[in-house]
Image (cartoon, grey):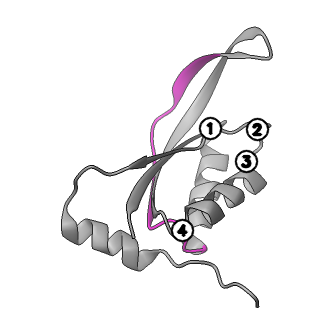
Amino acid sequence: MKVLLVICNMPDATQARQLAETLVAEQLAACVNILPGCQSIYRWQGQLESANEVPLLIKTTDTVYASLERRIQELHPYELPEILALPLAAGLAAYQQWVRDAVQPPLTGV
């Protein structure tokens, strides 16, 4: 089971906190850091856009990633949310074990 760092931006602090709490409560993430706001500049549907956003750093594992991605898509207000998963090259072994212990694959067939 590999630990992943997932990056996702939300449109405001309230929605960021709601998503973070849901992901941790549902055991799809061990921890979510809500960072200070940032300004994103991007091209969307042929137009240059700018938005104030709140970045999230989500710690999870590869075994629940697909469920976490689906849940973010269900709850996210954007048509196309940023969801990027990065594998860890290294990290404190005890912390990585804590992440593994804190997330649980969703029950299937129930």
Q: In this view, does 78 lie to the left or right of 23?
A: right
Residue 54 image-quadrant placement:
top right
Residue receiving disc 1: 82
Q: Give the range drawn in magenta.
A: 26-42
Residue type at mark 4: give it. Val
Give the residue drawn at x 46%, y 36%: 36
* Residue 9 percent across, percent down from the top left: 58, 38
31 within the magenta span: yes
Residue 102 numbered tag: none
Q: Which amino acid does label 1 sit on?
A: Glu
Q: Residues within 10 Å of mark 2 (few under 14, many from 20)?
A: few
Comparing marks 1 and 3, which lies closer to the viewer?
A: 1
Mark 2–mark 3 CB contact (< 8 Å) = yes
| Nearer the observer, 69 or 109 | 109
Identify the residue under disc 3.
76
Q: Which of 26 and 37 is in front in this view?
A: 26
Badge 3 element: loop
Label count reads: 4
In the rendered structure, are the residues bearing label 1 and label 3 in contact, judged by CB atoms less than 8 Å apart? Answer: no
Under mark 2, the amino acid is Tyr
Q: Which of marks 4 and 1 is nearer the N terminus?
A: 4
Magenta span has 36?
Answer: yes
Point out which mark residue 24 bears.
4
Q: Residue at x 44, y 67 (%)?
A: 30
Q: Marks 2 and 1: in contact by CB < 8 Å?
A: yes
Image height of 92 relative to 49, above or below = below
| Badge 2 element | loop
Q: Is residue 64 above or below residue 34?
A: below
Horizontal and vertical percent position of residue 37: 51, 32
**Residue labelled with disc 2:** 78
Residue located at (52% from left, 79% from top): 104
Give neighbour class at mark 1: few <14, some 14-19, many 20+ (Cα, 10 Å).
some
